[in-house]
Amino acid sequence: MQDVHQSILRTGVSGMPLEWIQYQTAVRLYYTDQVVYTCGSELAIIHGGLNTKTGKQSKIQLHSIIATQGCNQTLHQFYVPSLNNPTLFKRDANLCMYCGNHFNDSKLSRDHIHPIVKGGEDTWMNVITACKKCNNLKAGRSPEEAGMPLLAVPFQPTYAEYVYLKGKNILADQMDFLRAHFPRTSPLLERL
């Protein structure tokens, strides 16, 4: 039970996933009365100091999911997640979208479907994960020009999907919570 190293999923009052936080941040949110409710499994009990009047020691029970006040939920429908390679590779399940093989991060690269040298943009909808060999083979050509068809269509993750993609060592209750916020058509649902 005492796992203070496990990331905690922070949500807004409506339950929209917001971010992963460490136990120190969660304790501060509890202490400042910003936690509205909790769900999920109990992770740890953090013991504080002694009250000089009562002699009782303070304690905070941490859960795997906490809902907090003060977040503007409507911003998330217009949010475009920042594009970075680790998140892109996780979106594509560390699979080269040309040869279909799995690789570790060090053997992967970001490939622009419509090459940047031909006016392509560095956006979620124009990038896929490719092994370095396939990326070099494709070079500055489109998949059609290179004779290398894509194995999957790229997609821009929603905010909830992006929170999932940024997570490490996600607990089962946290995963269930996140999945409930994915669109029904999310390609991630097939991979989980």
Image (spheres, rainbow, N blue to C red):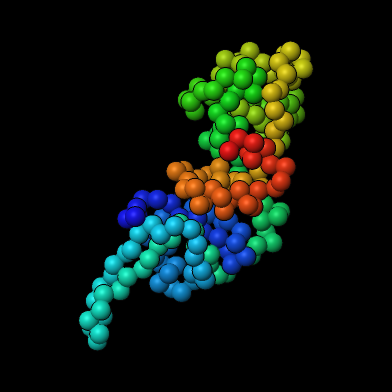
Residue 44 percent across, percent down from the top left = 35, 59
Quarter holding residue 95: top right
Q: Is the C terminus in the top left, top right, bottom left or bottom right quadrant?
A: top right
27 lies above or below 5: below
164 lies above or below 54: above
Q: Is residue 135 visible?
A: no
Quarter holding residue 89: top right
Along the line of sight, which residue is nearer the eye, 133 or 13?
13
Q: Is residue 17 visible?
A: yes
107 lies above or below 175: above
Q: Is residue 147 left or right of residue 58?
A: right
Residue 138 percent across, percent down from the top left = 67, 16
Q: Is residue 139 left or right of residue 26?
A: right
Residue 8 percent across, percent down from the top left = 45, 55
Q: Is the N terminus in the top left, top right, bottom left or bottom right quadrant?
A: bottom left
x 61%, y 59%: residue = 16
Along the line of sight, which residue is nearer the eye, 132 or 7?
7
Q: Is residue 63 left or right of residue 133?
A: left
Residue 177 percent across, percent down from the top left = 57, 53
88 lies above or below 7: above
x 46%, y 74%: residue = 33
x 40%, y 72%: residue = 31
x 56%, y 56%: residue = 18
Q: How many marks?
A: 0
- Extreme residue in the bottom direction: 53
Q: Is residue 68 left or right of residue 49?
A: right
